[in-house]
Amino acid sequence: MNNTTRVLLAASIVLALGACTKKVKEENTAPVTTGPATTAPVSDGRYTPADLDTDSCLRQRTVYFDFDQDTLRPEFQAVMACHAKYLNDRSESRVTLEGNADERGTREYNLGLGERRGNAVSGALQGAGGSAGQITVVSYGEERPTCNDTAESCWQQNRRVEIVYTAK
């Protein structure tokens, strides 16, 4: 290797390493005061039991399913994330997932479908950070309908998993 090649190689290495350095942006760390100090506690971003009744996401405690399906619909992913965060923030909390089905199908089939739906919600909660030790799944099949009419609009209401907090 001749000297010119070595110089070019060394220069390209220096340039490459220089391009990889992080540029650190200096932040103004001086406290900003806008008035008298308040004594209100600063929220650390963790959920509290009161949030179960006040937070719009946590108030959604019913997950609906399509006919004969046990896969979670995409529109419920955000709800799963909220409840998983609550479980993660509050390790003493416990939740029961109550799986339900509409009246169509045999009793045994609907009990199994309700359990699979409950397990789908459990899996989504765990996938978003909830702990399996905080979650219990039960299936009521078709035994606890919220609507008793014989129509699709009613059956849609019965194909669900209800999220019930047993310890907050």
Image: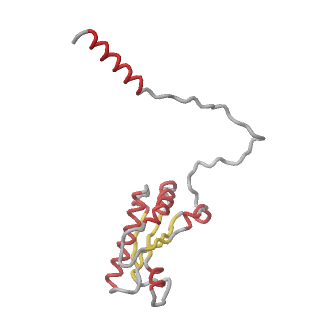
Which residue sits furthest left? 1
Q: Nearer the viewer, residue 23 or 143?
A: 23
> Which residue is pictured at 59% across the width and 31% down the height?
27
Horizontal side of residue 38 vs 69, given as left or right? right
What residue is rendered at 47% in x and 66% in y? Answer: 75
Looking at the picture, tell me which residue is in the foreground, 167 or 1: 1
Q: Is residue 21 above or below residue 97?
A: above
The relative height of residue 62 versus residue 127 in the rendered view (above or below) is below
The residue sitting at the front extreme is 4
Please state the horizontal and vertical placement of residue 106, each as a whole percent of the image. 33, 86
- Image coords of residue 98 (percent x, y): 44, 74
In the picture, measured across the screen, residue 22 lies left or right of residue 10, that is right
In front here: 101 or 40? 101
Residue drawn at (43%, 55%) of the image: 129
Colour mapping used in the image? secondary structure
Task: Kindly give the residue lying farthest to the right in the view shown.
Answer: 36
Name the outermost residue toward the top.
3
- Residue 34 image point, x, y percent: 75, 40
Q: Quadrant of the N terminus?
A: top left
